[in-house]
Image (tube, helix red, strand yellow):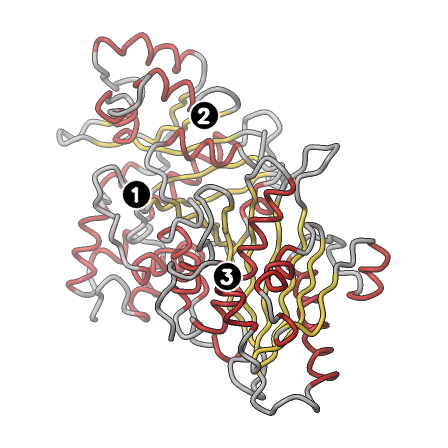
Amino acid sequence: MDKQVSSRGTKEKALRLNLDEKKYGTIVEIGAGQEVARNFFVAGAAAGTIAKTMSAYDMKFSDAIYGVQEDGRYVSKARVLAMMEQEFDLVVDRVGGVRSKSSRYFTYAATVSAKSFNRKNECHAWCGVRIQMYPGAEPSNIIVHVRMFDDTAEAQQQALGILGVNLIYASYYYFEDPKMIIDSLTDNMKANRIEIDCIDFQGPYFEDVDNQAKNIHLIRSWKTRAIMFKADGSVAVPADMLYKKNVLTIRGSFKPITKLNVDMIEQGYKAFATQEGVTDKNTVLIAEISLNDLHGKDANMSEKDIMERVKLLNLLGYNVMISDYTRYFSLRAYFRQYTQLQIGIVVGIVNIKQIFDEEYYRGMEGGILEAFGKLFPDNTRLFVYPERDGKGEINDLNTLSVPNNLRYLFRHVLDNGYITSIESSNPELFNIFSREILQQICRGQGEWVDAVPEAVGKAIMEQKLFGYRG
């Protein structure tokens, strides 16, 4: 396997593929020129690798070739998959009988919404490669969703051209290591030109690949800041999940999710539902886990550890977001990319104390005032769940004490409804502490079972999660 991930330029990668007569296929691109194909032609000797390139821009032509997908969208996963399947079958049917039996065929496909000349549009793409990992094998797929941030269509096309070469190259030379595939996708590209927020490995060679875990690696490989899972466990494209939706989120470690966490979510949703325009149909609820805790305690959590938490949250029907955001205003800014509707964040008293701690904003030029300006500019509210202190007293916003120099700021956000108290449904829940529950789980079956939802307790014991040994 070629380990020189960062040392090969785009032209060098394309030339290496062109000079290998065993690798042969088609490249079809819609919506952003034919930059991937161009890279192979510029490198030279492309006739040895490329059977056909095509770009069916007209919708009628495209529909006639690839059919009309159920969602009716042209820039979609379903459309790129249809393109890959159709073109791969064509190349095998037409040249499979005349080329060397050692040939390994591929099809690269991309359907793109690049920056438009006369309108403001979401700039994104679905790109994929369908490939034989060895001669005669059933094909496997690698599909990615990409967002483009360059200011011009030309620059976006150029970025996708580099990505396409990287994806084809990686699928041949790094297929035994999905993490290396991910790491190499932005080779030879400056930072912040694209974001890859979803990747899907399919097919016989990737049967043992955990797509959820590999999507988490997108964050650690700096391809994106956040990834999302639907309640059924499938990887979601954030733009699809959040578009024109009210968003309610709660941040936690959820190790494991407890009855206290569930009550926070339920009470937060009751309060959020009173906001203007919030209904069950247009609202998405998300449990968020940050990989970038301010104190660094979760920075090195394993993918296995994360996935145990995700699966238990999914078990209770929650969507899940994994991010590397530290501060709440960054989380809010992420959601605001996709929706202009209401955003609600459920927090505990300990979180509010942190938000009103000026040390929390060290390094920010505008300090706490800059942070509050970014957190509460429009349709964003914090819903604050109470706690019981060491003396057995219930603390909420009415009893919260903030530093004297911040008391008027606290009064301002409180009086304007930016932060709102929510109630606990059961005072006994205040006795649940996740760290204690985790320690009890490691010791075996015990009182912890009563502190977590029944389905969660059953899953922990059956699957031996979080160190449970029975």
Q: Secondary structure at mark 3?
A: helix
The amino acid type found where label 2 is placed reads Arg
Where residue 196 sits: x, y (%)? 50, 51
Residue 70 placement (x, y as % from top left): 75, 59
- Against 130, residue 396 (above or below) is above
Question: How far from the left and from the top, in percent, is residue 153?
Answer: 65, 41
Q: Gap between marks 2 and 3, in whole Å?
A: 42 Å
Q: CA distance from mark 1 to mark 3?
A: 28 Å
Q: Are marks 2 and 1 in contact (CB under 8 Å)?
A: no
Nearest the viewer among 324 and 41 is: 41
Q: Is residue 368 visible?
A: no
Instruction: Kindly identify the residue that appears in the image at 66 percent across and 74 percent down.
Output: 47
Picture residue at 54% right of the left edge, 27% below the top: 274
Number of the label disc, if any, that sits on residue 166: 3
For the residue marked with disc 1, what is the amino acid? Asn
Distance (Cα) linking label 2 and label 1:
22 Å
Q: Nearer the viewer, residue 193 or 305?
A: 193
**Picture layout, residue 236 above or below residue 167:** above
> Could you tell me which secondary element the residue under label 2 belongs to?
strand
Left or right: 454 as drawn, with respect to 19? left
Q: Which mark sits nearer the N-terminus, 1 or 3?
A: 3
Residue 424: in sight, yes or no?
A: yes
- In this view, the residue in front, 176 or 356, is 176
Mark 2 or mark 3, whichever is nearer to me: 3
Residue 381 has which mark? Answer: 2
Q: What residue is disc 1 on?
A: 292
User: What residue sits 24% from the left and 20% below the top?
Assistant: 358
- Labels 1 and 3 touching (C-beta < 8 A): no
x, y percent for residue 376: 45, 21
Which circle's residue, 2 or 3, is located before the other in the chain? 3
